[in-house]
Structures are given as structure tokens and as C-alpha cells.
Amino acid sequence: MSIETRLKEIKQALPDRVQVVAVSKFHPDVAIREAYDAGHRLFGESRVQELLPKYDALPKDIEWHFIGHLQTNKVKYIIPFIHTIQSVDSWKLLEEINKEAQKFHRTIEVLLQVHIANEEHKFGFTFDEIESIHRTESLGKLPHVKVTGLMGMASLTDDREQVRSEFRSLVSFYKQLQSTYYKGDESFRHLSCGMSDDYPIAVEEGSNMVRIGSKIFGLRE
Ligand SMILES: *Cc1c(COP(=O)(O)O)cnc(C)c1O
């Protein structure tokens, strides 16, 4: 099956509210081109050194989302063109994004990554940390950063109920944050959760942005 067909089938089966981030990491420019030529514009990459040459080589109306763990010293390379950084997992990173974005007179959209998995090594804020950032109005000090939602990754497990309950807690936190701190502010609108193996569960629970790699592009090398 072609990339175009797979993409079309995935999109057709999803409710209208759900956006698909095509995760193109480890796949070559030609594969991205194929999805682009089929009309897709939203792509996700997780490594700076891989994203930079892709950005250079590919059409400039692609909306690039950064989805991997981002080191502060690499922020400056992607600031000129990145649309959204989905994987913001520390206050220090938020400050760095703000600082670099200011130099380019840009405001960068970010999603706060929430640690929902039952695994030590996954990155992200706790619910409490995110709540506290909002309660203290600290974000007001970072005018070049715009929080447009949350991102989360469920545990890597065959236990579907575990995965479902992790997504459910994220959805409920997202709604609570929205109704407490973003009332009437429609820019806080993305809940990015669900990957190739678990996105149908995430969507059932209320996700409105899924990040799909292998199901579109095939297995990575
Ligand atoms: C690689 C990756 C994905 C996509 O994974 P697939 O299982 O190939 O769909 C989604 N989100 C993040 C953060 C990733 O690193």
C-alpha cells in the first residue's frame, strides 16, 4: 500500500476534530514528498540534526512540529522555522525557547509534555507542575512562547486498559486546565496523544491530535 493510500485511510476513519501529525523521522525526503503531494502539510520530527536538512530540502509551507526530547543548546537551530514544539518538558526549556524566539521576533507555539506513563524514563511535567506554572502566572514572563495545548505518551505495554486509563487522565487534566486557565481563549486547543499502536484508544478518550509514524511510512530502519 502506498503512503498516500495509508494516509487517506487513516484520516478517513478519524473524526473531523482530529489532526494527524505525520511522523517522518528516519524516513527520507521522498517519503515526505509523497505525503506532501497527497495534500498533507503537518509533519513531526524528533531530532534536530535530521530536521534541519529536511527543512532546507522540502517545501516551505510544511508545518513542522518538533516532538522529541529537545536540548536547550539546540533550540536556536529550529527557532527560525519551527511551527510548534510539542515536547516541552522543563521550565528551563521554555525560557530558552522564549529567549531565542525573541531574537527572531517570533512567538513559538508549544505543547507542554505531561508525564502520564508508568515508566521512569519518559520525559515530561507532572500534572502538579503544570498546574503550578499556571497558578503562579509564570507564563506571563515568556511573551514569545504560546502554550497551545498538552502532549503525552502512554506506557509501552500490551495492557490496553492501562493505556486507556493514562489517556483518560490526560484528557481530564486537559479539560480542567482549559476551563480553569484558558476560559474564552481558543488558542489552547491541542491535545496531542496517540501513536501508531494506540491512537484509536487515544481518540476514543478525547485526543484531537495524533502523531503517526510507522502506520503511514512503514517501519523505521
Ligand atoms: C516516533 C514518535 C511517534 C510516532 O511513532 P509510531 O509508533 O511510529 O507512530 C510519535 N510521537 C513521538 C514523540 C515519537 O517519538
Image (tube, grey):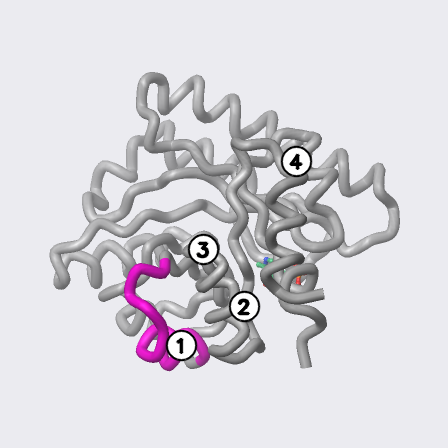
- Sequence order check: which comes first, mark 2 or mark 1? 2
Q: Secondary structure at mark 1?
A: helix
Alpha-carbon distance for marks 3 and 1?
18 Å
Residue at 32% x, 18% y is: 184
Image spot of residue 57 (x, y percent): 35, 79
From the image, tell me which residue sits under label 2: 24
Is 163 left or right of 30, judged from the image as shown? Answer: right
Crowd tier of the residue under label 3, counting other residues whose Cα lies within 10 Å: few below 14, some 14–19, many 20 or above: few
Tell whether label 1 touches label 2 (CB within 8 Å).
Answer: yes
Q: Amino acid at mark 4?
A: Val
For residue 39, the mark is 3
- Sequence order check: which comes first, mark 1 or mark 4? 1
Magenta: main secondary structure equals helix
Q: Residue furthest right?
A: 159
- Sequence order check: which comes first, mark 3 or mark 1? 3
Is 152 left or right of 129, judged from the image as shown? Answer: right
The quadrant of the picture occupied by the C terminus is bottom right
Residue at 58% x, 46% y is: 210
Q: Amino acid at mark 1?
A: Lys
Q: Which residues are magenta?
A: 50-62
Q: Say which quarter of the image contains residue 180.
A: top left
From the image, tell me which residue sits under label 4: 203
Q: Nearer the viewer, residue 39 or 99?
A: 39
Closer to the observer: label 4 or label 3? 3
Q: Is residue 53 above or below residue 130?
A: below
